[in-house]
Amino acid sequence: MRVIGISGMPGSGKSFVSDKAIEKGALIVSMGDIIREEAKKRGETTGETAVNLRKEHGQYIVSELTIQKIKNLQKEGHEKIVVEGIRSHHEVEMFKENFENFMIVSAFTNPSTRFERLKNRMREDDPQDYNDFIERDYRELGFGLGNVIALSDKIIINESNLESYIKKIEECFDEIDF
C-alpha cells in the first residue's frame, strides 16, 4: 500500500492534486472533511472545531482519526491513498510512523491568488472578506502548516494556468512513482 500526503494553504490547489491521484486509482482521505463532519455534529464552524478538537484530544487527534480511516481502507484492499490537508509536523510524523515510504507533496500559491480562488469556490467555510482570509491563514500557520510545506518532499508551484499546473502534478507523480 502506498500513502502520500498533500499539503498546502487553503486555495493552493490541493484538490487538483487529489483529482489527478484519483485518475491514477487512488482514494482520497481529506483531513478537512473529517473536521467538517465533526463541526456539523457539534454545530460549530470548521475553524472552531479544528481548534477545539486539538484542545480536547491533543494535537494528534485529526491524524489519529485519519490513520484509523486509512487502516480500514487498507483492510478493504485499497492500495493507493492520498491524505489531503495535512497541517502540522506532528501529523506528518504520525503518518510516517504508520505508513512505510510516506511522502508529503505540497501545493504552493501566493496569497492574493488563493483568496480569489476561495471567493470563487464558495465552499461554506471559504472566507469572502480578505481580513477573514488572513485570519484563517494565520490559524492554519499556527497549526504548523508552514513547517509541513517547508519540509515537503515535493513542492508544486501553482502560479500559472490550470493546464500548466496539471502537467506539473503529473510530472511530480512520475518522479515519485505514484
Image (spheres, rainbow, N blue to C red):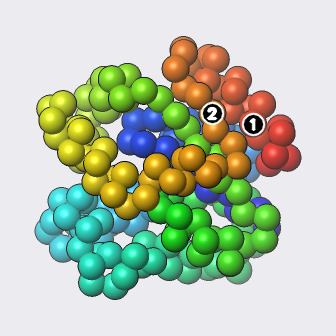
- Judged from the image, the secondary structure of the residue bearing numbered disc 1 is helix
Image side of residue 79 versus residue 87, left or right: right
Looking at the image, how many numbered discs can be counted on the residues? 2
User: Mark 1 — residue?
Assistant: 172
Image side of residue 173 versus residue 142, left or right: right
Q: Residue at x 30, y 29 (%)?
A: 115
Residue 102 percent across, percent down from the top left: 72, 63
User: Mark 2 — residue?
Assistant: 156
Residue 51 percent across, percent down from the top left: 26, 68
Q: Residue at x 26, y 34 (%)?
A: 122
Q: Residue at x 53, y 64 (%)?
A: 89
Residue 101 percent across, percent down from the top left: 79, 64
Q: What is the C-alpha distance between the residues marked 2 and 1?
A: 8 Å
Q: Which comes before the other along the chain, label 2 or label 1?
A: 2
Three-letter amino acid code at the position of disc 1: Cys
Labelled pair 2, 1 in contact (Cβ < 8 Å): yes
- 161 and 132: which one is in front? 132
Whether residue 71 is situated above or below residue 170 in the rendered picture: below
Q: Residue at x 36, y 29 (%)?
A: 111
- 61 and 170: which one is in front? 61
Three-letter amino acid code at the position of disc 2: Ile
> Which of the 4 image quadrants contains residue 57?
bottom left
> Which of the 4 image quadrants contains residue 39?
bottom left
Question: Neighbour class for label 2 at 10 Å: few (<14), some, many (≥20)?
Answer: many
Residue 58, numbered label: none
Image side of residue 122 versus residue 13, left or right: left
> Which of the 4 image quadrants contains residue 99?
bottom right
Residue 100 percent across, percent down from the top left: 78, 71
Whether residue 113 is situated above or below residue 27 in the rendered picture: above
- Judged from the image, the secondary structure of the residue bearing numbered disc 2 is strand
Q: Is residue 33 visible?
A: no
Question: Neighbour class for label 1 at 10 Å: few (<14), some, many (≥20)?
Answer: some
